[in-house]
Amino acid sequence: MPFPDHPVVVLGTDKDDRARSRFDSAHELAHLVLHGEQIWGVKEVETQAHQFAAAFLMPAEDIQDQLPTSVDWPALFALKRQWQVSLAALLMRARTLGCMSENTYLTAIKAASARGWRRVEPVPLGRPEQPTRLLAYLASADSASARAILPSQIVESLQTAAAA
């Protein structure tokens, strides 16, 4: 949410999936960078945020030569580990960058759906990343002024989430 004095991004913890959490974070960053106070939820705005997230996490000049042109699951699994993104994001990026044809992309998506990978992908990457620098800062004496203005339940929630 683009508050006038500072932006706030709230991410759900219900997915418990590093790849999806990273994409969600980049998607929300896109809204703050590209859209400011524009209305969100509009298809065009959401598409732009998805495109930004994909480019932010998988820059074309770095990934294009690595993306397969066919449905090569072992190669995609390796890329998932390397880039820390979902298979779905890799497939979409391969299509968007012209590495994979529309038909090949659709074949891959259908195969992933048939295997149940649209809900739970293979090759889990672990839990979402934690805000380690923020937590270290909040634990330091330097953060006294920040802790004075932050609601205590927010600080406690961050510390509880990091301990879990």
Image (cartoon, helix red, strand yellow):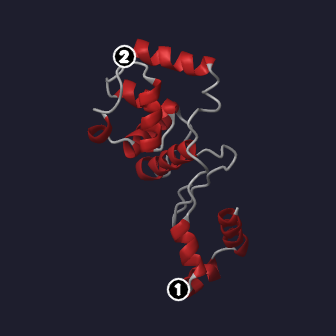
Spot occupied by residue 65 in the image (x, y as percentages of width and height): 27, 32
Residue holding disc 1: 142
How many numbered circles are shown?
2
Q: Looking at this view, is 72 or 35 the one in front?
A: 72
Mark 1 lies on a secondary structure that is: helix
On the image, the x and y values in percent for residue 47 come to 46, 33
Label 2 crowd bin: few (<14), some (14–19), many (20+), radius 10 Å? some
Amino acid tagged 2: Ser
Picture coordinates of residue 128, whole percent (x, y): 59, 51
Disc 1 residue crowd, few under 14, some 14–19, many 20+, Cα 10 Å = few
Residue at 48%, 40% (x, y): give it.
Answer: 85
Residue position marked by numbered label 2 in the rendering:
101
> Residue at the location (63% across, 83% down)?
148
Residue 70 located left or right of residue 80 = left
Q: Is residue 105 left or right of residue 19?
A: left
Q: Is residue 47 above or below residue 81?
A: above
In this view, 127 is above or below 6? above
